Image (spheres, helix red, strand yellow):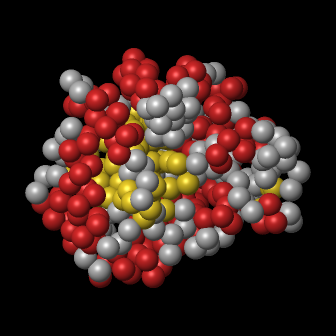
Amino acid sequence: MIYRELGSTGLKVSEIGMGCEGFAEDNCRMTKKLFDAAELAGVNYFDLYTSNPDVRKAVGEALRGRREKFIAQSHICSVWQDGQYKRSRKLSEVKAEFELSLEQLQTDYIDVGTIHYCDALDDWHTIETGGILDYVRELKSAGKIRHIGMSSHNPQVALKAVESGAIEVLMFSVNPCYDLLPASEDVNELWNEANYASNLTNVDPDRQKLYETCQRRGVGITVMKCFGGGDLLDAELSPAGVALTAHQCIHYALSRPGVACVLAGAHTVEQFNQSVAYETASDDEKDFATTFATFPKISWQGHCVYCSHCAPCVKKIDIASVTKFLHLTAAQKSVPETVREHYAALKHHAGECIQCGACEKRCPFGVKIRDNMKHAAEVFGY
């Protein structure tokens, strides 16, 4: 298992994490089975958005004796009322539910306390000014949560939260179809077939800006909806009209700036292990670019997706990484220190490019790589 830095939190998280969708299966007996499989595979990160008390208690039992082996991302403002889950911004409900969750989980702290489901700008304003954010900060000061997170599907709202400096971890929906769509306060628009009816080109700029801002500011991204609820794995259901594999979806998400962990939902141990198998998959099995090039209504023409088809470079430059770091400097009046350090750590740099053009012949999307290398050499100075 490969482990990544979760932004600037200091946490090292498995790049494959565990979603909680399957925990309720078989009267919650699946919970322990999935945690056993996770421990065996070296998966140390999981998300718990549900407020279902039976699921929380099952998680608590599954963690008994091994709490320190797992990093818990559990949601604040997810409450249980009248036998069902709902999102709340009522402070008294939120406080009572969080304290109850600690009891149910048999723990005295949560690693990443995640403000649940904020997709509207006015909702973010409510969180900032209505006491929720103050309460979450109090929880962190008291040691009841270690880091502050938020979940969202809307890149504009998520960016607002990230730029506020209030959150350290962002749970966000990342996959190659959602990434094409403009921001919306209605999460159902991500599944709306009408939005994919016309030709779409390249990543939505708000989403690209969000990922790059998270990378620059040290906000770690944990990924939900990597498979689009399973739709992307089925050619008949996929908005792209072509099926992707689980390995391709995971690799795409892990290639985005700022991403530390993909939370793989699974209803069985077998499904979970299919995602974990990404760690031993071949480069060909992970390669998403050749499939992208066949999408009938979606084009990434001229846009670098960091797929590394440009490799190998005759001067051994990691072209995909150089391009990613170059993108991270866009719209900045100066090169962020962290980006400069990461660029400096590369074994070979853009200034070594001899402009042979071999990389451009291999690029499936017609990216002007030689121009990018010239620009990067100018920006970074070598």
Work out whether residue 344 can be spotted.
no
106 or 121, nearer to the observer: 106
* In-image side of 378 versus 291 (left or right): left
- Residue lying at the far left of the rendered structure: 142
Which residue is located at x 55 percent, y 33 percent? 266
Work out whether residue 285 can be spotted.
yes
User: Considering only vertical position in the picture, is 226 above or below 157?
Assistant: above
Which residue is located at x 43 percent, y 22 percent? 33
Residue 74 at x, y percent in the picture:
34, 49
Residue 282 at x, y percent in the picture:
63, 21
53 or 358, nearer to the observer: 53
**Quadrant into which the N terminus falls:** top left
User: Considering only vertical position in the picture, is 280 above or below 306?
Assistant: above
- Residue lying at the far right of the rendered structure: 296
- Residue lying at the far front of the rendered structure: 82
Residue 163 at x, y percent in the picture:
38, 71
Which residue is located at x 43 percent, y 77 percent? 123
* In-image side of 245 versus 97 (left or right): right
* In-image side of 307 versus 324 (left or right): right
User: Considering only vertical position in the picture, is 267 above or below 305?
Assistant: above
Residue 358 at x, y percent in the picture:
75, 39
